[in-house]
């Protein structure tokens, strides 16, 4: 199994895998609203690939991270979705993707990671509820499932408020020498929050006929 950065060639297979894992209505969930019109963090989007018996490359796992804002002024990244092929969910691929991506996030200078997921699963990676106790998500969620991880000690100390979407800037005439800065928007309350913990769904590069893939989050 290899872990590499996601490439454009993986996109269709990832989408199909996520649809199979979470259903076509996944885009209506609160977490997807936080991602709307926002590009994922390209340097932290990884895929796990393997080869089938015919020597074809098969995508068996995917993990992505998205930029968010905490309390209107603190940058962070949100883990999810993560999906592993259903027939490989007990093989530790999800854990390898999480550890690999968190190490990359720290090396790139990110300070805070948040997610909504199964606490007993994510605690092994250092996530906990206490560091995000002062934060709220834009929709109802079991507080025990909203967790955070400080990649830099104390990065969440005193941080409070709503988790907001890092929205792209409006189209405008560019000023030479200046780069547009993304604005921050806070979402109104929405219904359900999608779990980042739905660990595991498989992605296809081509899809192997001998090795069916399944989804999990």
Image: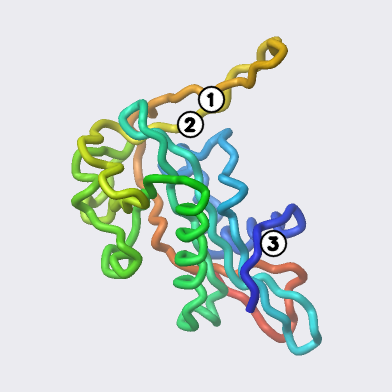
| 142 vs 26, nearest the viewer | 142
Determine which residue is flagged by label 1: 182
Q: Measuring 62% from the left and 72% from the top, which residue is drawn there?
A: 60
Quadrant of the snapshot with the N terminus: bottom right
Tag 1 or tag 2, which sits nearer the N-term? Answer: 2
**Disc 3 versus disc 2: nearer the observer:** 2
The residue tagged with tag 2: helix, strand or loop? strand
Q: Rate crowding at label 2 as few (under 14), some (14 to 19) or many (20 or more) other CA atoms within 10 Å.
A: many
x%, y% of residue 41? 56, 45
Which numbered mark, 1 or 3, is in the foreground of this view?
A: 1
| Helix, strand or loop under label 1 | loop
Residue 166's disc number: 2
Residue at point 66%, 12% (across, down): 172
Horizontal and vertical percent for residue 149?
A: 32, 53
The residue nearer to you, when weighing 132 against 146, is 132
Q: How far is the residue under mark 1 from the one under mark 3?
A: 29 Å
Q: Which residue is pictured at 41% across the width and 56% down the height?
A: 196
Viewer can see residue 33? yes
- Check disc 1: other Cα within 10 Å, few if <14, some if 14-19, many if 20+: few
- Whether residue 22 is visible to the viewer of this picture, yes or no, is no
Label 2–label 1 contact, CB within 8 A: yes
According to the image, label 3 marks what residue?
A: 13
The part of the image, by quadrant, that contains residue 157 is: top left
> Furthest residue to the bottom?
53
Task: Report the side of 114 relative to 24 (left or right).
Answer: left
Closest to the observer, 77 or 194: 77
Mark toward the start of the polypeptide (3 vs 2): 3
Answer whether labels 3 and 2 touch (C-beta < 8 Å). no
Q: Is residue 2 left or right of residue 22?
A: right
In-front residue for pair 168/30: 168
């Amino acid at each position: 199994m290899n872990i590499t950065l996601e490439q454009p060639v993986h996109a269709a297979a990832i989408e199909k895998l996520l649809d199979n894992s979470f259903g076509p209505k996944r885009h209506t969930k609160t977490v997807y609203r936080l991602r709307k019109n926002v590009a994922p963090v390209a340097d932290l989007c990884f895929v796990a690939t393997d080869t089938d018996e015919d020597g074809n490359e098969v995508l068996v796992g995917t993990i992505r991270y998205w930029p968010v804002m905490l309390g209107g002024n603190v940058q962070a990244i949100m883990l999810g979705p993560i999906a592993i092929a259903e027939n490989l969910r007990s093989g530790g691929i999800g854990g390898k993707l999480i550890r690999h991506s968190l190490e990359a996030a720290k090396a790139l200078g990110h300070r805070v990671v948040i997610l909504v997921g199964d606490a007993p699963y994510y605690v092994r990676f250092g996530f906990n509820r206490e560091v995000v106790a002062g934060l709220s998500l834009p929709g109802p969620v079991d507080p025990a499932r909203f967790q955070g991880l400080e990649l830099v000690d104390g990065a969440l100390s005193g941080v409070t408020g709503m988790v907001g979407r890092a929205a792209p800037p409006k189209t405008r005439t560019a000023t030479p020498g200046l780069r547009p800065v993304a604005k921050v928007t806070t979402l109104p309350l929405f219904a359900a929050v999608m779990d980042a913990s739905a660990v595991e769904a498989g992605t296809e590069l081509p899809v192997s006929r001998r090795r069916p893939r399944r989804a999990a989050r």
